[in-house]
């Protein structure tokens, strides 16, 4: 069974469109994250939810809106996509503060 | 400003060689984690070091946490093609153990 899964794996879209990425974890973890990895492989945290509550919101444009319907799911909706949004987006989860984070396989977003 | 500086950025070696990669900071970290990321996948935790001066071994990989907890190193003995990947160090910061800051990584290629 996949621990942290994301859909879709690849997403190609036009500038200005709205898109969503879904994430699910079956590890029973309380905390989930969204990261962005740019073309230079730099991995940067965007958001974190603990028990469906937003606990970390880095300086991310408000075009990005995370939603956690329950502890096992954290979705990311992006409005008005821009060229600079092209990147690989990773979902992750953890059970403990400062503990191991388990990452999903990533969603490669390409904005044309 | 990058909190964790990793060096070298790129490393290409032949199978059987030894190598060391570094993760340095001017800040003290309560712990540091090392992840390996293979192409098309999310990062996977290799080890967490917590105590200054700590040395941990994982088969041919040796991890060391500096005495002052500002730096860490990863030494690989007799590298194999399967060691190829992006090695990332990460540590909690910003007063939250949920928030990990990552270095930019060392991209290692081990040629057969």
Image: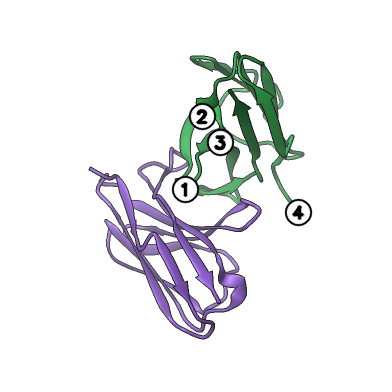
Chain colours: A purple, B green
Give the CA distance from mark 4 to mark 2: 24 Å
**Disc 4 or disc 3, which is closer to the eye?**
3
SS under mark 4: loop
Q: What element carries label 3?
A: strand
Q: In which quarter of the image is the N terminus of chain A?
A: top left
Q: Is mark 1 on a helix, strand or loop?
A: loop
Q: Residue at x 32, y 53 (%)?
A: A5
Crowd around label 2: few <14 · some 14–19 · many ≥20 (10 Å):
many
Q: Which chain carries label 3?
A: B
Q: Residues within 10 Å of mark 3 (few under 14, many from 20)?
A: some
Task: Report the Cα–Cα distance between label 4 and label 3.
Answer: 25 Å
The answer to whether B29 appears left or right of A26 in the picture is right
Q: Position of residue A10 (x, y in %)?
A: 42, 63
Of the numbered discs 2 and 1, the one sitting upstream in the chain is 1
Q: Name the residue under label 1.
A: B40
Query: Does label 2 lie on the same chain as label 3?
Result: yes
Q: Residue B38 in the image: x percent, y percent?
A: 50, 39
Frontmost of labels 1 and 4 is: 1
Along the viewing direction, whichever of A30 and A60 lies nearer the viewer? A60
Q: Marks 4 and 3: same chain? A: yes
Position in image of residue A93 (x %, y %): 38, 49
Q: Mark 4 lies on which chain?
A: B
Q: Mark 4 points at which residue?
A: B1
Kindly identify which residue carries mark 2. B48
Taking A47 as reference, is A2 above or below it? above
Asked whether, in this view, residue A91 is left or right of residue B73, the answer is: left
Work out how far the residue at label 3 is from the one at label 2, CA to CA, in angstroms. 18 Å
Tag 1, which chain? B
The residue under label 3 is B85
Mark yes or no: residue B35 visible. yes
- First in sequence: mark 3 vs mark 2: 2
């Amino acid at each position: 069974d996949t621990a942290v899964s994301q859909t879709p794996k690849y997403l190609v879209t036009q500038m200005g469109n709205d898109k969503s990425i879904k994430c699910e974890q079956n590890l029973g973890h309380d905390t989930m994250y969204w990261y962005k990895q740019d073309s230079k492989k730099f991995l940067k945290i965007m958001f974190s939810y603990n028990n469906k509550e937003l606990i970390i919101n880095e300086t991310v444009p408000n075009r990005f809106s995370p939603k956690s319907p329950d502890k096992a799911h954290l979705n990311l909706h992006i409005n008005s996509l821009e060229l600079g949004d092209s990147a690989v987006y990773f979902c992750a989860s953890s059970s403990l503060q400062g503990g191991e984070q388990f990452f999903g396989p990533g969603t490669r977003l390409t904005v044309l | 400003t990058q909190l964790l500086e990793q060096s070298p950025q790129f490393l290409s070696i032949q199978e059987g060689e030894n190598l060391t990669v570094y993760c340095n900071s001017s800040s003290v970290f309560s712990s540091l984690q090392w992840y390996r990321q293979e192409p098309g996948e999310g990062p996977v935790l290799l080890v967490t070091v917590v105590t200054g001066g700590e040395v941990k071994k994982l088969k041919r990989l040796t991890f060391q946490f500096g005495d002052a907890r500002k730096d860490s190193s990863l030494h690989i003995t007799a590298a194999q093609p399967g060691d190829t990947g992006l090695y990332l160090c990460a540590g909690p910061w910003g007063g939250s153990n949920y928030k990990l800051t990552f270095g930019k990584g060392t991209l290692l290629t081990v040629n057969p």
